[in-house]
Image: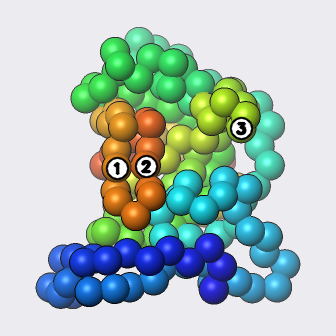
């Protein structure tokens, strides 16, 4: 297990149980590299490795944004529904009753931290898929145990634009 994180008093609604202490991490497998996002940058139990992303053609329309625009306009967009198109670089399934997708579109930069969007959804996607997502913008989300997100899209609808 890589990048293990301790969570205390973790409540699992699906199991109707609170765990006094539980560790979440990434199951390592041959050929999988650790996440370039570092510890605490993704929800626990990530199941897929990271992927290098080129430029993805953005969506158009009043509610459409690219990833970097979401970060730059987060205060104005908080609580609003937006659409983003990008490539799925990482998938975490079934944590806190949701699937967690990392989405990149080639905008922003890793150095400034505005290139990777966290999306929560009930839908599923695979690493490498090009998807369009529509969800509500949440800012400054603190999940505890060091998992903080400046911007994320929650409860998103996911449309597969192109498989890998």
SS at circle 3: loop
Q: Quadrant of residue 7?
A: bottom left
Cα–Cα gap, marks 3 and 1: 20 Å
Left or right: 136, with 11 as reference point: right
Residue 100, relative to residue 155: is it above or below?
below
Number of marks present in the image shown = 3
Query: Picture quarter containing residue 105?
Result: top right
Residue 7 seen in render: yes
Mark 2 — residue?
Answer: 148
Tell me where residue 53 appears, x and y as whole percent.
Answer: 77, 43
> What is the quadrant of the N terminus in the image?
bottom right
Q: Earlier in the sequence, mark 1 or mark 2?
A: 1
* Residue drawn at (34%, 85%) of the image: 21
Marks 1 and 2 sit apart, C-alpha to C-alpha, by 4 Å
Q: Which mark is residue 142?
A: 1
Give yes or no for contact between labels 3 and 1 (Cβ–Cβ under 8 Å).
no
Task: Determine crowd level at label 3: few under 14, some 14-19, many 20+ residues with C-alpha closer than 10 A.
Answer: few
Quarter-of-image position of residue 81:
top left
**Would residue 14 be seen by someone viewing this image from the given angle?**
no
Mark 1 and mark 2 residues within 8 Å of each other at the beta carbon: yes
In this orientation, which residue lies closer to the viewer: 14 or 139?
139
Crowd around label 1: few <14 · some 14–19 · many ≥20 (10 Å):
few
Provide residue 45's location: percent of width, then percent of height: 51, 75
Say which residue appears at 43% left-offset and 36% top-offset: 151
């Amino acid at each position: 297990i890589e990048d293990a994180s301790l969570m205390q008093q973790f409540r699992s609604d699906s199991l109707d149980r609170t765990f006094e202490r539980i560790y979440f991490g990434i199951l390592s497998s041959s050929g999988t590299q650790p996440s370039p996002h570092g510890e605490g940058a993704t929800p626990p139990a990530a199941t897929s490795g990271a992927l290098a992303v080129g430029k993805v053609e953005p969506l158009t329309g009043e509610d459409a944004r690219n990833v970097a625009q979401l970060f730059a306009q987060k205060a104005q967009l908080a609580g609003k529904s937006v659409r983003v198109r990008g490539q799925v670089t990482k998938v975490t399934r079934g944590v806190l009753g949701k699937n967690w997708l990392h989405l990149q579109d080639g905008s922003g930069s890793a150095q400034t931290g505005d290139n990777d969007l966290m999306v929560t959804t009930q839908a599923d996607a695979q690493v490498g898929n090009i998807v369009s997502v529509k969800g509500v913008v949440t800012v400054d989300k603190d999940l505890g145990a060091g998992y903080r997100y400046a911007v994320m899209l929650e409860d998103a609808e996911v449309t597969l634009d192109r498989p890998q």
